[in-house]
Image: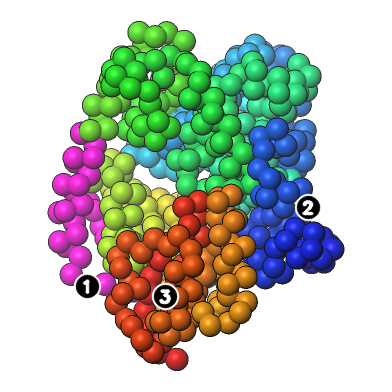
Amino acid sequence: MNIMEFGDPEVQFEIPVRLMSVLAEKGADNEVLLDMTLNPSFDKLIEPENLPNMSSLVKSLLRSAGRQEKILIWGHEDADGITSVAVMLRTLRHIGASLGYYIPSKANEGHGLTAEGIDWAKNQGYGLILTVDTGSGDLEMVEYARSLGMDILITDHHELTSSTSGITVVNPKMGGSFKHLAGVGVALKTAWAILALRNSYSLADLEREFPELIIYAMIGTLADKVPLFAENKAIVDRGRELMARLSFPFIRAYERIRGARPSPEAIITAISAGKSSGGQHPGVDLLITQDQVVAEEILAELLSEADRWFARAEKIYAEFVQKVKRVRGYILLDAGDTEPGYLSYISSKLKNKYDVPAIVMGHKPDGRIIAEIRAPWGYDMMDLLSNISHLLSDYGGHKLAAGFTMEAEYLPSLAEEVEYYFTSGKGVFDESRGAEIIIEASDNEATELMDSAEHLGKLGVEIRFLVKGTARDVSNLLSRYNTHDPEALLSVHGGDVRVKALVISGPEGYTVENLWVDEK
């Protein structure tokens, strides 16, 4: 982005030019998104028609609904996908569509669209599939569906891995909104577009008539750990407000069982504990049921399952962490027949413990390999998967969190190619750990930049600083702010020892994530 499009940003927005460039890279790359970042407001959400292909997607949906053609909502088995399905079910049922939903089991079916699932949908009489929070990595499945006389419309937020030519895809990575919307944020905008075209709804009308959609969007956005500024902050703030003062069966069920009003995080834990079976998921059923008794029955089982899950997850992790004898810049772990639902937990914990990418694989009942990858800042796991894609059945995700499935026969080749990727220089590591601004603690500019970033942090914008200088200068600079140093890293070195500190802005001030001696 040419920041001069905004005139003089330091005068117009009171933001230093270097921070303006960072905001542009983060997605605030036009005046509308910059204003939404600095003044986040749900009432100013960018209209859904700005998303490429949204108008044609909505018209196709309404056409199918009007003809009573069966529509299948295809989701993803996580809290973002669950809430996305709930948003679309509630919306499409309101307009009288004939529909059902399908969330494939990670344990048995893997990620995304599959030929087997499409065959099932065809046999069940579905003519149209609408994906939510999935599909960007499975565009070849659209042609397969069309060969059966069906069509697929894709709404998603994951990285696009191939050309979308001839396919109706709504994805914020293509422009027209904040690019870091969660899958449920895209679903909410799709719902708004449907209701606007069908019933002439404004956003205020949607909030008045269907506040639960905003609550679902808030829950899924928080769960997916997307950047919480601009449109995401607006959705989360309004959703929290609505959840605090309104009541729905799933909220009342929690109050009855736990004796307290649920937090969004409590609902995330509950719905994430469920498992898909036959395409159906108890988390979806909990959110959309209007029957209080049914809600209590579902929630009681989910809460029990969550307790069992965490106890089991900790036990499994304790077993596998002992098997990690040597870390060579990455971890590749075969977890055998461990249930796929635990793989992301194990990979995340290993990543946190060893500060390297962790690839944790499990074996599905049909013999195929399923894997979850988590990486610290500085790595790009989508680049890794692109380099080994010839071995994979499918893959998708983000730079720091991704997954794939593959045939077991390719496991030896996978181990070789992952080793080559990390040891040959093919996989580039960012030594600054994703720092967006590098400053000398003693420079006058450092205070100006960190003052502005402190304000942006309160608006949900995380700015990653690499602060260089003597330990004394770094400590003096950070002492000006509300700085969290949970591991007391600032006290490790003193005086004139030159250090580098990775410091991140946030709603509560700055956090010291890492600190090491500056060898240069």
Residue on which disc 3 sits: 475
Residue at horizontal 31%, vertical 74%? Answer: 491
Q: Is residue 179 left or right of residue 106?
A: right
The label on residue 326 is: 1
The N terminus lies in quadrant: bottom right
Residue 373 to residue 166: above or below: below
Q: CA distance from mark 3 to mark 2?
A: 36 Å
SS category of the residue bearing label 1: loop
Q: Is residue 144 left or right of residue 269?
A: right
Q: Amino acid at mark 2?
A: Glu
Residue 434 to residue 115: above or below: below
> Whole-percent x and y of residue 488?
30, 68
SS category of the residue bearing label 2: helix
The label on residue 371 is: none
In the depicted view, which residue is nearer to us: 519 or 394?
Answer: 519
Q: Amino acid at mark 3?
A: Ser
- Binning the other alpha carbons within 10 Å of mark 1 as few (below 14), some (14 to 19) or many (20 upward) gives few
